[in-house]
Amino acid sequence: MGIFARDENRTTLAASRIARQATASLAGLLAGQGKTRSDLAAAMGVSPGRVSQIMSGDANLTVRTLAAVAEALDADVQITFCARGQSTDAKACGSADSSPVRSSGLSARH
């Protein structure tokens, strides 16, 4: 049994959906910045093939990979958990802190 044994099929489908959301957002950011996948590869110090893997959504996108992409593009990453059926907007989800976390560090909490 895997660590997500409750329903591995649902977990796999959810992971695919999240990867598609991340890669669609990344593609939009690249387009908005007027950058290509080759530009991203150069900024990340990886091969264009690695960027293609990331952009395909098939790769297991780790938090470290997302952070590397964000740093290369001088961007922020936002991850928001919402109850199903709610908006993915952080404020609509009732998040106490809807500000993005810079990929290079965590927000200070006192």
Image: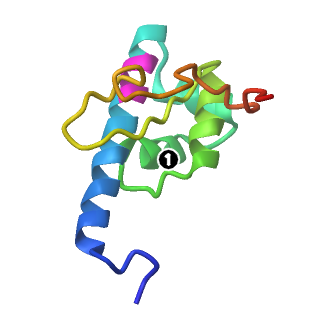
In this rendering, the answer to whether 79 lies above or below 94 is below
Q: Which residue is at 44% across, 49% downward?
A: 53
Task: Determine whether, in the image, residue 85 is placed left or right of residue 110.
Answer: left
Give, as a three-letter code, the residue at label 1. Answer: Gly
Q: Which residue is at 24% across, 71% downward?
A: 9
- Determine crowd level at label 1: few under 14, some 14-19, many 20+ residues with C-alpha closer than 10 A: few
Q: Nearer the viewer, residue 98 or 39?
A: 98
Residue range highlighted in magenta: 25-30
Q: Which residue is at 42% across, 25% downward?
A: 90
Name of the residue lying farthest toward the left:
85
The answer to which quarter of the image holds residue 74 is top right
Disc 1: which residue: 49
The answer to which quarter of the image holds residue 109 is top right
- Name the quadrant of the C terminus: top right
Q: Main secondary structure of the magenta part?
A: helix
Task: Determine whether, in the image, residue 68 is placed left or right of residue 12.
Answer: right
Q: Nearer the viewer, residue 97 or 74?
A: 97
- Name the quadrant of the N terminus: bottom left
Location of residue 25 in the rendering, given as x and y in whole percent from the top left corner? 38, 27
Q: Secondary structure at mark 1?
A: helix
Residue 66 drawn in magenta: no
